[in-house]
Image (cartoon, rainbow, N blue to C red):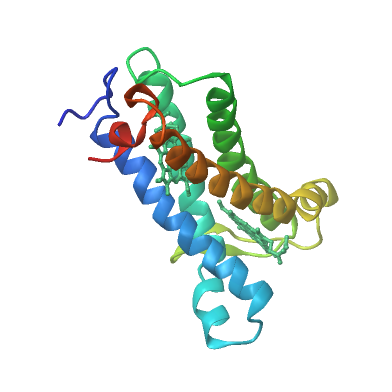
Amino acid sequence: MALIDAKDRYGLLSRFFHWSMALLILWQFTGVLARVLAEDTALEKFFWSTHKPLGVVLLVLALLRLGWALVNLSRRPPELNLAATLGHIGLYALLVAIPALGLLRQYGSGRSFDAFGVALFSGFEGRIDWMVEPGNLLHGNLGWILLAAVIGHVFMVFWHRRGNKEQDVLPRMWG
Ligand code: HEM
Ligand code: HEM
């Protein structure tokens, strides 16, 4: 299978981005749900401990994926309809905005921060409010909206499988 996309199927690199991010996002939401539903348990400790560094990895993957999607725009499979186009744009926007707001808040808090042993911020005295407040207001809420959007996305994929062959988009991304 080719690395680049074609009109009838996504290529290897797009599939790599799609499915690796789907798995990592599943991990991320297991942690978020454990934090809310299973506070102070071993499950929460295990999954939540990776929330910030994994969020940074997801941000990097989302930006690379966005770049790759733009490079392939004229040759990837056509969107089924306007709702699908808007839905996919919305998913991309959330995949970038949520970790970016988290990271901005992290920087503004003045605390040092490293992701999987790589030092990203060294920290400083005080706090930068305009960097912290958007994250406080939006990071968690947009995160829950992403969870709902992903569930809707998967539902629509299987909904379309019931229709005619042109509507069945799963083989474009899987198999
Ligand atoms: C795609 C990546 C990410 C997703 C989907 C995500 C999602 C979420 C969600 C849904 C919550 C709310 C949990 C609750 O209601 O208790 C949350 C909380 C939090 N996230 Fe993230 N997050 C991501 C990346 C990051 C990053 C990169 C950072 C920091 C570097 C971060 C830091 C935090 C912190 C400190 C909280 C607890 C405070 C709060 O609820 O806002 N997250 N995240
Ligand atoms: C974390 C979860 C997920 C996210 C954020 C996500 C996001 C996206 C996005 C943005 C696209 C547009 C193509 C692209 O640029 O890559 C897409 C396409 C697609 N996704 Fe997902 N996806 C997720 C999970 C899943 C799952 C679990 C399935 C399996 C049922 C699935 C099936 C598909 C299919 C079949 C397409 C092609 C749709 C078409 O060509 O119209 N996705 N996904």
Q: Residue at x 44, y 33 (%)?
A: 160
Residue 145 screen position, x and y as percent: 67, 48
Q: Examine the rendered structure and indicate whether residue 50 appears above or below residue 19.
A: below
> How many discs appear?
0
Q: Residue at x 79, y 47 (%)?
A: 134
Q: In this rendering, would 3 be left or right of 100?
A: left
Residue 172's image quarter? top left
Q: In this rendering, would 102 be left or right of 150?
A: right
Q: Examine the rendered structure and indicate whether residue 126 appears above or below residue 151.
A: below
Q: In this rendering, would 41 be left or right of 168?
A: right
Residue 63 screen position, x and y as percent: 48, 36
Q: In this rendering, would 153 be left or right of 64?
A: right
Ligand 1: image quarter: bottom right
Residue 123's image quarter? bottom right
Which quarter of the rendered picture does the C terminus lie within?
Answer: top left
Q: Examine the rendered structure and indicate whether residue 90 appears above or below residue 125.
A: above
Which quarter of the rendered picture does the N terminus lie within?
Answer: top left
Of all residues shown, which one is farthest toward the left? 1
Residue 81 screen position, x and y as percent: 52, 19
Residue 141 screen position, x and y as percent: 74, 52
Q: Residue at x 60, y 60 (%)?
A: 122
Out of 141 and 56, give the one closest to the viewer.
Answer: 141
Q: Residue at x 63, y 52 (%)?
A: 103
Out of 165 and 28, give the one closest to the viewer.
Answer: 165
Of all residues shown, which one is farthest toward the top? 74
